[in-house]
Image: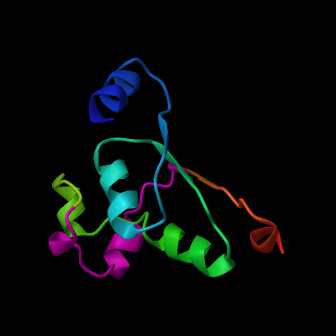
Amino acid sequence: VQPLVALANEAGFHTIVRIPDESRVSIQGYLGIGAKGLVIPMIESPKQIKEAFDNVYYGGWREIGLEPDSRNLRANTVDDYAAVDREKILAFMIESVAGVA
């Protein structure tokens, strides 16, 4: 995926990647390779949306471009929230009747 995202970004496209889940490792990993937006599948509750949204904020390790690795993740700080890239596009997919309710 990384080479495709890099080529698309270089060509001026706004790259959006469908990720496997709403986990912090997935979200920060795909943002770390340069995706400008994410489609986040299988959302079933407002709590999952909040968790996914919170995971868009980069911690210090992500700033230096490390690959997804749970050993390098840390809690977000006030500075992280202030420095977030507000141009990211997030699309949450509710894919069940229970999720819609």
Residue 22's x, y, as percent?
Answer: 48, 65
The residue that appears at 61% across and 62% down in the rendered structure is 42
Residue 25's x, y, as percent?
Answer: 32, 64
Asked if residue 72 is positioned above or below residue 95 in the image, the reply reads: below
Q: Residue 1 lies in what quarter of the image?
A: top left
Task: Decide whether residue 87 is among the magenta residues.
Answer: yes
Asked if residue 65 is positioned above or below residue 8 in the image, the reply reads: below
- The C terminus sits in image quarter: bottom right
Task: Decide whether residue 82 is among the magenta residues.
Answer: yes
Q: Nearer the viewer, residue 85 or 92?
A: 92
The residue that appears at 23% across and 73% down in the rendered structure is 73
Q: How many marks?
A: 0
Q: Nearer the viewer, residue 36 or 83?
A: 36
The residue that appears at 36% across and 31% down in the rendered structure is 5
The answer to whether 47 appears left or right of 37 in the picture is right
Q: Nearer the viewer, residue 18 or 89?
A: 18
Residue 99's x, y, as percent?
Answer: 75, 71
Q: Give the residues drawn in magenta, as a range.
A: 69-89
Residue 55's x, y, as percent?
Answer: 42, 69
Name the residue furthest top: 11
The residue that appears at 33% across and 22% down in the rendered structure is 7
The answer to whether 66 appears left or right of 31 in the picture is left
Colouring chosen for the image of the structure: rainbow
Asked if residue 68 is positioned above or below residue 1 in the image, the reply reads: below
